[in-house]
Amino acid sequence: MAEHSHSHAHAYGPTGSGSVMLNLGGDTGALIVYTGRQLLGREIEISRVGDVGPRTHAAVRERPVQDGTFHSVVYADLPAGTYTVWWDDERPAGTVVVAGGSVAEFTWPTSASLPVG
């Protein structure tokens, strides 16, 4: 994961089996943001609620599973807390709680279900 405040898309191939390592335990958790194929390569930013520093971002990747593929972003090694998942530079897509020792999940909203504000 890298930290900077701009968004852009990358051309990544599918991830291989076992390519994501999660260090879970104590006050450390992880977050998976599920998206659709249309976001492949897009970087999605998150930030801990209340933090004013740079956001953390990672790219949507294709992830093969036994019955096909899905598309997601994985944020490993996150301190426990509440995180904002950002739709764009100014609007949040929603919030999610990451607990230590576990993996939180967030489903990317459609534009029709994006919170107003």
Image (spheres, rainbow, N blue to C red):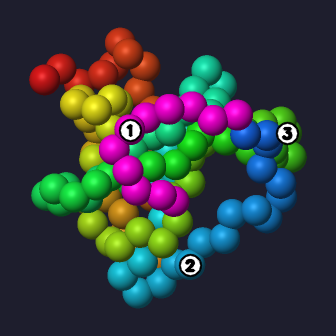
Find the distance from the CA under tag 3 to the CA under tag 2: 26 Å
Quick one: SS at disc 2? loop
x 51%, y 59%: residue: 1
Q: Quadrant of the C terminus?
A: top left
Farthest residue to the top: give it.
112
x 83%, y 58%: residue: 17
Q: Indicate the amino acid at tag 1.
A: His
- For the residues bearing labels 1 and 3, Cβ distance under 8 angstroms: no
Q: Where 101 sits versus 52, above or below? A: below
Q: Where 40 sits versus 99, above or below? A: above
Residue 19 x, y percent position in the rendering: 76, 62
x 43%, y 35%: residue: 7
Q: How many marks?
A: 3
Q: Which mark is residue 6?
A: 1
Residue 100 x, y percent position in the rendering: 39, 76
Find the distance from the CA under tag 1 to the CA under tag 3: 34 Å
Closest to the observer, 78 or 66: 78
**Magenta span covers which residues?**
1-11
Q: Which mark is residue 67?
A: 3
Query: What residue is shown with label 2?
Result: 23
Helix, strand or loop for the magenta stretch, by majority: loop
